[in-house]
């Protein structure tokens, strides 16, 4: 094993032991590429990458998430977990990737900021319904995209952070395409 491979292996082990990034991730960190790279480096071989296979339902969810990503709209992202709530305002990108969790095998879509200081990981199979809600509040209209599990449990809410004609038009096109409530089938 060369020095570079050894350093990559040590960095990955330290990152795994320290749980780097997992405190703010709603699901496991997608490390398929890193894991296969480490295994190949340890064996002295070349890195391989696993390409996830999506079900028809996951393809629909992936298409919806691509629409969000391509919009370049900034969202107030709210994730409610057991004992914690995470709120952050970001665009979904500029990085978008599809991977498979090495831990669970679940397909993940990851949105990451340029420096990867913000990442949102979504399990495509968990999204069963999306609600597109407009709610008037003082001085503005809130536009919310709620991603829900089977049974209505919330995965996360994406609140359009800017109330402008441009974002209102974008939201209207999303409602025209997906409806007020979109049941993924």
Image (cartoon, rainbow, N blue to C red):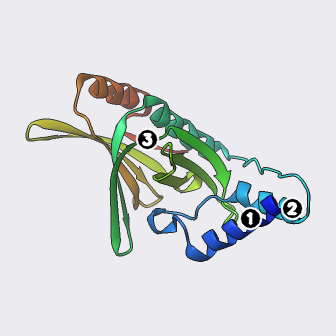
Residue at 43%, 61% (x, y): give it.
Answer: 151
Indicate the position of residue 179 as horizontal and vertical percent values.
38, 34
Instruction: Please state which of the two labelled residues, at mark 1 or mark 3, is closer to the viewer.
Output: 1
- Callout 3 crowding tier (Cα within 10 Å): few <14, some 14–19, many ≥20: some
Q: Nearer the viewer, residue 105 or 121?
A: 121
**Position of the C terminus by quadrant:** top right
Residue at 34%, 42% (x, y): give it.
Answer: 75
Marks 1/2 in contact by CB < 8 Å: the verdict is no
Q: Which disc is residue 182 wearing? A: 3
User: Alpha-carbon distance for marks 1 and 2?
Assistant: 9 Å
Q: Which of 44 and 123 is in front in this view?
A: 44
Residue at the spot of label 1: 7
Mark closer to the chain start, 1 or 2: 2
Q: Which disc is residue 55 wearing? A: none
**SS type, badge 1:** helix
Question: In the figure, is residue 35 to the left or right of 88?
Answer: right
Residue at the spot of label 2: 2
Indicate the position of residue 10 as horizontal and vertical percent values.
72, 70
Taking 142 as reference, is 124 above or below it?
below
Residue at 50%, 42% (x, y): give it.
Answer: 114
Residue at 67%, 47% (x, y): give it.
Answer: 55
Marks 2/3 in contact by CB < 8 Å: the verdict is no
């Amino acid at each position: 094993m060369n020095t570079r491979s050894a350093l990559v292996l040590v960095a990955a082990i330290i990152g795994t032991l320290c749980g780097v990034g997992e405190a703010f991730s709603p699901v496991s960190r997608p490390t398929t590429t890193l894991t296969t790279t480490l295994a190949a480096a340890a064996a002295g071989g070349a890195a391989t990458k696993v390409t996830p296979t999506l079900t028809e339902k996951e393809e629909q969810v992936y298409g919806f998430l691509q629409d969000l990503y391509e919009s370049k709209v900034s969202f107030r992202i709210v994730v409610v977990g057991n004992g914690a709530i995470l709120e952050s305002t970001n665009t979904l990108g500029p990085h978008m990737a599809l991977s498979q969790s090495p831990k669970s095998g679940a397909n993940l879509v990851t949105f990451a900021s340029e420096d990867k200081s913000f990442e949102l990981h979504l399990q495509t199979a968990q999204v069963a319904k999306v609600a597109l809600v407009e709610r008037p509040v003082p001085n503005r209209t809130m536009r919310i995209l709620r991603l829900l599990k089977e049974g209505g449990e919330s995965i996360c809410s994406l609140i359009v952070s800017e109330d402008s004609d441009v974002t209102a038009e974008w939201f209207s096109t999303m409602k025209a395409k997906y409806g007020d409530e979109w049941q993924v089938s």
